[in-house]
Image (tube, helix red, strand yellow):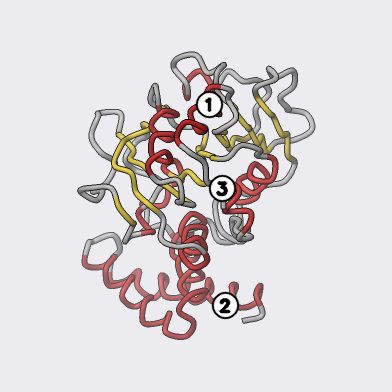
Amino acid sequence: MYICSKSKIQQMHETKGILEILIATMNRSNLDFLDKIFPYSYAHLNLIIVNQTSTEKTISNAPKYIKVINSFEKGLSRSRNLALKNATTTYCLIIDDDVVLLKGFEDTIIEAYNKNIDKAVISFQTLTPEGSLSWNYPTKSGYHKRLDKILSLEITFNREIIIKNDISFDEQFGLGAIFQDSENYIFLKEVEKKIGKPYFYKKSIVIHPALTSSDEIERDRHTFARAALLYKYKKNITYLYIVKLIFFLLRTKQISIKEIPNKWSIAVRGIKKYKELNHA
C-alpha cells in the first residue's frame, strides 16, 4: 500500500508526479476537445487520453505532458483498463470527454488524499451546469453506502493499491460492450470486496448535466445489462429483483402494463447471455 506524508505528497504534486487524468474519447484527430474540459491552462497536468478510433482518424503530435493512446478496440471498460495500464502516477481521476473540470480540482483531490492517505478510492461531487448538485449526496464525508449512485467522473483511485489487488473494469459491461451499463458499480464492488468501502469526500470537482445514460432506466439496453449485473451477484434470486424493477418502472409510469412482457423478456435474455458468456 502506498503511504506518504503530507509534505511528500505536496512535493510530488509540485513535480507533476502525483495525479493523472484518464480521459476516454472516440474518433478524435486533434486535441481541441480538451479546451472544453479545461477552460483554463492544463499544461501543468498529466493527461492520458485513450482515443478509440480507426486508423484513418488518430491523434498525433501531442505535447509531452499528454500521453495519447490511439486504440482500435471498442468499449468503455477497455478504454478505462488501457488507461489504467499506462498510468504511472500515484492517483488517477477517471473522466469522459463531455465534462468540465472545476479550476483547482487537482488540489481538491490531493487535499482529500492528504487527509485519507490509506484510501484506495475517493469519490467527489458533480455540479450541474446550473450550479446544483447532480444527486442527493451524503451530508458529510465518509464511506459510501450507495455504490450504484457514484458516477465515473467522480471516481479517483490510488493506482498502486488498485493494481496490487488486481482490480480492473469488467469488459463485458459498459458502453460499447455486451452489457452497456454498470461498469462503475462492478469496479467499486470489487474495491469494496478486496479492500474496503470507497470513501466520499464532500467537495465538487466537475460539472456535468444531471442526466446520464445510466439514469435512463426505462431503456431496453439498461434492462438487459441490469439483469446481467443482478445475476452476477444474486444468481437465481435475480428473477425476484427483476419483478421489483419492472414494477418500479410501472409505478413511476416509465412503462405501461402492456410493456411488461417485453421488459421481462429482455431481462431474461440478459441473464441468459451472462450465463452463456461466463458458463454460469
- Mark 1 element type: helix
**Label 3 amino acid?**
Tyr
Q: Residues within 10 Å of mark 1 (few under 14, many from 20)?
A: few
Q: Earlier in the sequence, mark 2 or mark 3?
A: 3
Q: Nearer the viewer, mark 2 or mark 3?
A: 3
**Label 1 amino acid?**
Gln
Task: Locate residue 185, reporting x and y percent.
Answer: 46, 59
Q: Residue at x 23, y 34 (%)?
A: 132
Q: Residue at x 35, y 54 (%)?
A: 149
Q: CA distance from mark 2 to mark 1?
A: 52 Å
Does 148 appear above or below 61?
A: below
Quadrant placement of the C terminus? bottom right
Q: Earlier in the sequence, mark 2 or mark 1?
A: 1
Q: Earlier in the sequence, mark 3 or mark 1?
A: 3
On the image, numbered disc 3 is attached to which residue?
A: 2
On the image, numbered disc 2 is attached to which residue?
A: 272
| Between 210 and 14, the one nearer to me in the picture | 14
On the image, numbered disc 1 is attached to which residue?
A: 11
Say which quarter of the image contains residue 90.
Answer: top right
**Label 2 amino acid?**
Lys
Q: CA distance from mark 3 to mark 1?
A: 15 Å
